Amino acid sequence: MSDIIVQNLLSPVVLFFVLGLLAAIFKSDLKFPNGLSEGLSIYLLIAIGLKGGIELSQYSLHSVIKPIVATLLIGGIIPFIILFIMRLMKMDFKNSIGLAATYGSISIVTYGAAVSFLDSNGIHYEGFMNAMVVLMESPAILVSIFLMKVMERNDTTLNIPTHSIGFMPASVKMIDKEVIRESLFGKSILLLLGSLVIGLSLGEEIKPIVKPLFMDLYSSILILFLLNMGLIAGERLPEVRQHGMKLLIFGLSIPLFLGTLGVLMGNSIGLSLGGATLMGVLAGSASYIAAPAALKTSVPEANPSIYLGLSLGVTFPLNLIIGIPFYYEIAKLLN
């Protein structure tokens, strides 16, 4: 596995991320304009959605039903795992919800880096896995915020009693409409889902139009985005250290654990070596776009320096450097 780790470390996407990280650590004046940063995010969301839709149009519902069910299942289970761990760590309830939503959702850029890793090594993966990115974006956000609403109305101390997790009294109101709107129609999910539907509806006939911009230039745009992510991650590293070694260990270990669960899930439903690897990436990555956007309005008491600092400053680089080749090796052993 050491050869794969070295290869991943020397890939352009990782090296440019490290460059941004170093620029932030040494307080360089390198900055990305807000408009450019936003534009890069929009580009990646559309590119992944279109590619997923075009690929998905080539498969029958029968061939993708198992991956869809598996993706939704693991996306809904992860928040419960995170909440249980946070209870053991004695983390307060609102920040526990923040971490549950963040780690249950996914990092689109980590997934994009994993696809580049597989493509560069000639490893086959099912094209419909790009569509699974869209499906796994929101379940954890919805489940986490739903659990918060349940606990707020049934536990005034805002602790997480083990007997309450997964239990919903009949008197509890469902998630507020505004929360559902924020989760389902936020920028990230809207662009991903919209692009996916367009790609699915038009199929291969749209490929000549979108290929020059959204496929041929994808790897180059990803480099620019990761350079910017390196700058942001470097700025947030001190914030993570303020919350103690336990959180740092959590941010380094939980992705590998969840990623392994994802690989096991992918292998159990018959995905290829590359497909199981990508399922591991989906389970092991943490959101720094969709989840933080939803948490900002739905759980304002949660501290962004905890959930965003960990996802972007710890888990994101861990997955780029170690996680992706680790999930691949686990998938290879099982395959």
Image (cartoon, helix red, strand yellow):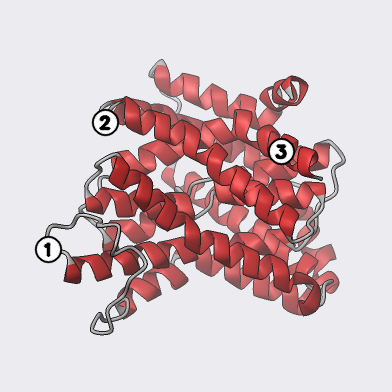
Give the structural element (helix, strand or loop) at label 1: loop
Foreground mark, 1 or 2? 1
Q: Classify residue 318 by image quadrant.
A: top right
Residue at 61% of width from left, 52% of height from top? 44
Residue found farthest to the front = 163
Residue at 28% of width from left, 84% of height from top? 170
Marking on residue 330:
3
Give the structural element (helix, strand or loop) at label 3: helix
Q: Is residue 257 visible?
A: yes
How far across and how far down the image is residue 13, in percent? 65, 32
How far across and how far down the image is residue 32, in percent? 46, 36
Q: Is residue 315 above or below residue 62?
A: above
- Give the residue number, with chain letter if any, for mark 2: 243
192 on left or right of 301: right
Q: Amino acid at mark 1?
A: Thr
226 on left or right of 126: left
Give the structural element (helix, strand or loop) at label 2: loop
Q: Is residue 73 above or below residue 256?
A: below
Residue at 71% of width from left, 46% of height from top? 277
Residue at 70% of width from left, 33% of height from top? 325
Q: Nearer the viewer, residue 198 or 274?
A: 274
How far across and how far down the image is residue 177, in percent? 33, 80
- Give the residue number, with chain letter if any, for mark 1: 156
The mark nearer the N terminus, 1 or 2, is: 1
Residue found farthest to the top = 26
The mark nearer the N terminus, 3 or 1, is: 1
Q: Amino acid at mark 3?
A: Ile
| Cα gap from disc 3 to disc 1, whole angstroms | 43 Å
Q: Amino acid at mark 2?
A: His
Q: Nearer the viewer, residue 222 or 293?
A: 293
35 on left or right of 240: right
